[in-house]
Amino acid sequence: MRRSLVLLSLTLAGCGITQLGSGRVDRSLAALVPADTTVLAGVRMDELRATPWYKKSVGDKPLPELDSFVKETGLDPRKDISELLIVSDGAKTAVLARGEFSRQNLQASINRQGGKRIPYKGFTLMGSEETVVVFLNSTTAAAGQPAAVRSIIDQRGRSTGLSPLLRQKVEAIPPHHQIWIVATGGFGDISKTVPQSGNFANLGKVFSMIESLTAGVDLRSGLHLFATGVCRSDQDARSLGDAVRGLVALARLAAPSGDPDLLKAIDGIQVEQQQRTVRLTVAIPQDLWDKTVGKLRNR
């Protein structure tokens, strides 16, 4: 489930929002964010649906990770949801969703998967021991690990919403980015979930170096991405910067010879390091992005 949520946050986005600084988070969803949240990701479906990438690459096409999320929760971001907010404390993860839901259809979908109805503090959790969905009102739902969903219910009406540090990071994200993520910790726990062998072991080490993160993706005209990571020390930042540059170099070496488009796309990736901060920027124009996505899909 966690893997589905992480990949979902990187491939989808949502809308239907109320201004909260420049980062724009739906206030009703922000009020449900548990106090111990360290990782927060926003996805704005209406804005994403309008991008050329979504129309060509997602639409109604089958996507294994997204289809798995729909099967597990009964919620389909392509149809039902206007905004998603993914919350995590580094150990447990849940998704808060705004939209127009058909409880009857969702319940029938969950029942087909052998789901159970679990009463909890006046609400009904539907699902299994691994994943549940609950309707908090007619336009708001929460889905994810049972412990995470129960925590949202426990703090409902008492949560103060985003912490000052999370709020500051959200407000630093330009409003036109359809996908964004901010984090103020919890990477140590996340790194423990990464397999400790092969390249995945290196990925776990990368997570363990990062103290905080701010990132956003804009797909209105090609791919424009930024990520700013603050590490525990200057040495960790140098190691992280070198690791990312190494991945870019490997991608260049792996690119088919004589493919100028793919090489030009890779050249649109820039990595900078200054003291404890590492900045990654990606700028690929629409025509080049279309060619790159098409070639990667066909490989």
Image (spheres, grey):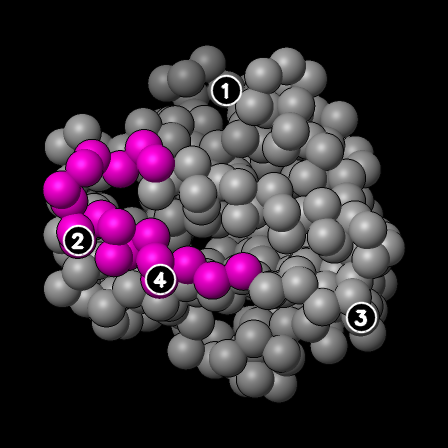
The amino acid type, in three-letter code, at marker 2 is Asp
Which one is closest to the eye, mark 3 or mark 2?
Answer: 2
User: 10 Å neighbourhood of mark 3: few (<14), some, or many (≥20)?
Assistant: few
* Residue 290: quarter of image: bottom left
Judging by the rendered image, the residue that carries numbered circle 1 is: 115
Badge 2 marks a residue whose secondary structure is: helix
Q: Earlier in the sequence, mark 4 or mark 1?
A: 1
Q: In which quarter of the image is the N terminus?
A: top right
User: In whole angstroms, how far apart are the C-alphas of marks 4 and 3?
Assistant: 31 Å
User: In whole angstroms, how far apart are the C-alphas of marks 4 and 1?
Assistant: 46 Å
The structure residue drawn at horizontal position 13% and vertical position 42%, both measured from the top left corner, is: 258
Q: Say whether residue 226 is magenta.
A: no
User: In whole angstroms, how far apart are the C-alphas of marks 1 and 2?
Assistant: 48 Å
The structure residue drawn at horizontal position 75% and vertical position 26%, both measured from the top left corner, is: 192
Query: Of residues 219 and 247, which is closer to you in this image?
Result: 247
Is 210 situated above or below 287? Answer: above
* Callouts 4 and 1 close, C-beta under 8 Å: no
Q: Say whether residue 258 is magenta.
A: yes
Q: Earlier in the sequence, mark 3 or mark 1?
A: 1
Region rendered in magenta = 253-271
User: In whole angstroms, how far apart are the C-alphas of marks 3 and 2?
Assistant: 40 Å
Q: Where is residue 271 in the image (x, y as percent from the top left)?
A: 54, 60
Q: Which of marks 1 and 2 is nearer the N terminus?
A: 1
The amino acid type, in three-letter code, at marker 4 is Gly
Q: Which of marks 2 and 4 is nearer the N terminus?
A: 2
Judging by the rendered image, the residue that carries numbered circle 2 is: 261
User: 10 Å neighbourhood of mark 2: few (<14), some, or many (≥20)?
Assistant: some
